[in-house]
Amino acid sequence: MRFCKYGRAIALLGILSSCGCSGPSPTKLDLLGNDSSPHASPDGRYAVYLHESGGASDPRPTGVYRVQLDSLVVRNVTTGEFAGLDWLPGTDSLVVAGRATLKVLSSVSGSGSIIAVTVAHSVSVSQDGNAIVYTCQTGRGVRLCEYVLATGQIRQITTY
């Protein structure tokens, strides 16, 4: 595909369109969904991210994906709608926030288990892997909450 000077700028901005070299005449291409919430693995070999399918034209289902950074090979870890994720240090596992759960999943096999029933978003795991901080929905709005892996306790951190 050739881009004219306008088309190259459009492509660099991440907009999926092209133009003829005689002047801008955008051609709409099918959107292939949205990728978000990227996290590099602690060893720097992988990245994980959330993908929201763009519909029938998108060959990838909504879910969690892992990309090997040296080869750029992408694989689906698990399907479903998720709101956040982060690596669990010292493992190949991820903490993911589902619709109403926190789960620990293997980034290799996708298998895992629910560790808490809570509405969670924007997950962040401590460097020692002992605590998971996330945004949680409360009766007074969205607040910060913490899940302690050793005890299974959940506490609201911000209370204003």
Image (cartoon, helix red, strand yellow):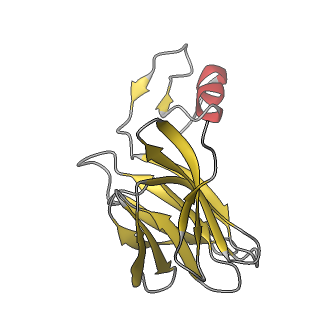
Q: Residue furthest left?
A: 56
As drawn, is 16 to the left or to the right of 29?
right
Image coords of residue 1 (percent x, y)? 52, 40
Image coords of residue 64 (percent x, y)? 45, 65
Residue occupying the point 69% across, 77% down: 129
Q: Residue furthest top?
A: 23
Image coords of residue 19 (percent x, y)? 50, 24
Total marks drawn? 0
Q: Looking at the picture, does residue 13 appear above or below residue 98?
A: above
Task: Give the camera-side residue of 8 and 94.
Answer: 94
Task: Give the camera-side residue of 5 and 160.
Answer: 160
As drawn, is 1 to the left or to the right of 100?
right
Residue 160 occupies quadrant: top right
Residue 88 occupies quadrant: bottom right
Task: Give the camera-side residue of 155 and 27.
Answer: 155
As drawn, is 134 to the left or to the right of 52?
right
Image coords of residue 136 (percent x, y)? 49, 49
Residue occupying the point 64% across, 86% down: 91
Residue occupying the point 70% across, 79% down: 89
Residue occupying the point 67% across, 71% down: 69
Q: Looking at the picture, does residue 143 appear above or below residue 43?
A: above
As drawn, is 154 to the left or to the right of 31?
right
